[in-house]
Amino acid sequence: MASALPSSNNVIHAKRALLIGNNKYKKNSQLQYCTNDAEDLANKLHKIDFEITVGINLTYEQMDRMIKTFTDKINPDDLILFFFAGHGCQWNHLNFLMPIDDDRIKTNTNLECRAINAHATLEKIMSCRPSATIFLLDCCRNTFVCKSSNSNGLTSIRAVAGSFIGFACDANKVALDKSINGRNSIFTSHLLRHIDQPNLTIEEIMYDVCDGVRKATDDDQCPFRISSLIRKVYLNQQFTIHEPDKMHVASHNGYSIKKTREFIIKYGPYLRTTLQVAQILFKLGSFVIPQLDSVSDAVGSSIDTILPTPNKQKEIEDQLNLVEKLLDRVDHKWAKPKSMMLEQDKSRGVPLQGPDLREVETYLDVPDNKRSLGNLYRTVTVDGHVRWVCLEHYDDISFNNTMSKYIDQLEAMGGQSILVNHININTKWKQHGITIVGSEGLRHLINQLSHPESISYPEGIYVDDDHETIYIADYENDRIVEWKYRAENGQVVAGGNGSNQLNYPRDVIVDKKNDSLIICDYGNRRVVQWSRQNGRNGETIISDIDCSRVTMNKNGDLYVADCDKNEVRRWKQGEREGTIVAGGNGQGNHLKQLNFPGYIFVDENHSVYVSDCENHRVMKWMKGAKEGIVVAGGKGEGNSLIQLSSPYGVIVDHLGSVYVADRYNNRIMRWCEGSCEGSIVVGGNGKGKQPNQFNHPKGLSFDVQGNLYVVDKWNNRIQKFDIDSNKINN
């Protein structure tokens, strides 16, 4: 089998990890477990095919040089993991990782030139454009005593798009300098337990880690984590081939076997599988294998050597038969230890990957090349899975890696288009909105079907970019109004014929798969499905529920907020009862409770965001979580940048930033992931009906261009705020 080497344009992606552990501090207390933490984690990651760089007990110069060397090796779309265990501190809203020569740090300003700036390190890594970066810090021990800095843990850090950040303890807290196994810190011991688990995303891994740390410390230590990943990231994704009809065999001249006997004994099951594939392909068409002149001698067989014959097809068939006879002879000639037999039996049908595939090289005469084996070249998918593929499939993977990022973003809002590259943390919107639906002058005509351009106390909005259409839950008129982009008039597409059809609808979404609307029919205590193809009546799909909001994930599962039971349930297709995914523990303000859930949003990781209205906060419930975390507000009712007042509409962008309609403060707020306070996006100019004012804003939505739509309820209008192109700063 033969293939040319990859050209310089074919960059091979990798999984790379840099791990640093410092114990032997000169000024602060020496630590016990940090070097073990770095070395043990390196061993775990090596087994799942990470390329490892480890530093132990490093000075500032050594840490700085190692980080620079590491970042210089990063190629675009590599998967990166950075881990530090040791002392750390914060100063001037920045986090610093301490080298062992901390005795040279005399003042706060020394930190900038004698310690590693964690924020700057993350930015250096992300500037290399990796597919994702996992940034884990196990520092801020409670034995840190440096007086020249703020030793009260690490400050919260804003995740750069494409990064996941985890601390051993919560922001502004310290980690316990203890161990549960006598070798590793509490945080790292749980990290080691889960980091190599197959087919789990990093979010799922860290959820298990955090849950374990909290239980082990009786909630004294609660790890901090924020994610700005734009897709699912797997550190150890496994695949099994069940579709032989899709198997691709690429050509290569082959290698000479150095230790033939041991090779055939060890890899007998794989050789037999390969033989069966070759026999099938031979029957289907031309298939060429190398000459086997010396193989029978190498394994001590008395079978005659097969020489080339004029009949090429007959020659190949004879060669395949020879291989089969050799394998049969080996099976009977040499007894195998029971452990090897169990290993071989276990290996049947499991493709070789990572270190196992590399072990094959010890039996072959191959060049010293870490990037290729035969015609296979090493690449890493954006999911974090290492694949050994031929150039034909390498091109496919490279294309799919790029496209899948955009596909996931487009599906992240449960079928509703999400902006791709139009929003970043510096994006600004024009401060004066454009009224696209509603007119104060037509307020007296709101109950007439001939005037769907007028709306009365609207609640929910759905932007369908595919059809350039906006759907509005026209609350007091008991109907759903459809409004085409740039149209002067809308039309009623559901309800409008009395409360027997719809009664105070609060929300509407589009089920694109079934080409229908899903309506939260609050007054009739039900959820209704209404066909978009001349639907005259809706079909009740969930009944006996005080539904305040509804949304859908990309799998077609429905999420419904029940404002009376203070819970959010998920309904998979065919389910009757649904599953509680947020709240459900009575009315209250604890992390496991809600108090009048308003709007809900579900991200691509199935985390549920809930505007917890009467608790004046927005909660995030990760998949499978027993309690939520506060991502906006939660500091009591008020109008400061750390407070909300009865929040309603909530949406989340691809960076993890939360946008919330701060109802009684008449403003739209943005809380970047991990931030302690929000910022005003639009509004905040008092209650009113001017283009830069609101009167009880409710629903929110983005279109695919990143323009913001706001349901201005008591002004009976929908406001559109365009991105301010004059203030875009990438």
Image (cartoon, rainbow, N blue to C red):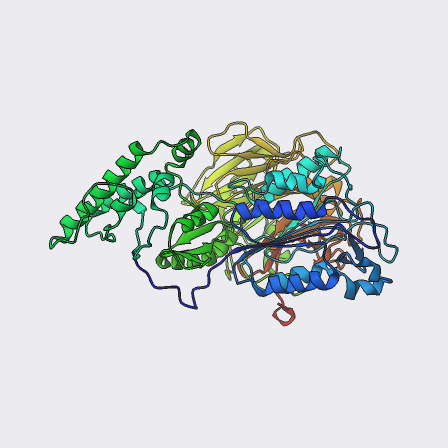
* Relative depth, front residue between 160 and 249: 249
Quadrant where the image shows the N terminus: bottom left
* Residue at 29 percent of width and 42 percent of height: 299
Residue 564 rendering spot, x and y as whole percentages: 67, 31
Name above or below for residue 257 compared with residue 199.
below
**Residue lying furthest left:** 310
Q: For this view, does 162 lie left or right of residue 63?
A: left
Quadrant where the image shows the C terminus: bottom right
* Relative depth, front residue between 189 and 695: 189
Say if residue 648 shows up in the picture. no
Residue 576 rendering spot, x and y as whole percentages: 51, 27
Say if residue 297 shows up in the picture. yes
* Relative depth, front residue between 117 and 64: 64
Q: For this view, does 21 lie left or right of residue 375?
A: right
Residue 43 rendering spot, x and y as whole percentages: 59, 46
Name above or below for residue 182 compared with residue 282.
above
* Relative depth, front residue between 638 and 357: 357
Name above or below for residue 249 compared with residue 61.
above
* Residue at 70 percent of width and 37 percent of height: 213
Looking at the rendered structure, the number of numbered marks drawn on it comes to 0
**Residue lying furthest bottom:** 726
Residue 350 rendering spot, x and y as whole percentages: 40, 39
* Residue at 17 percent of width and 52 percent of height: 307
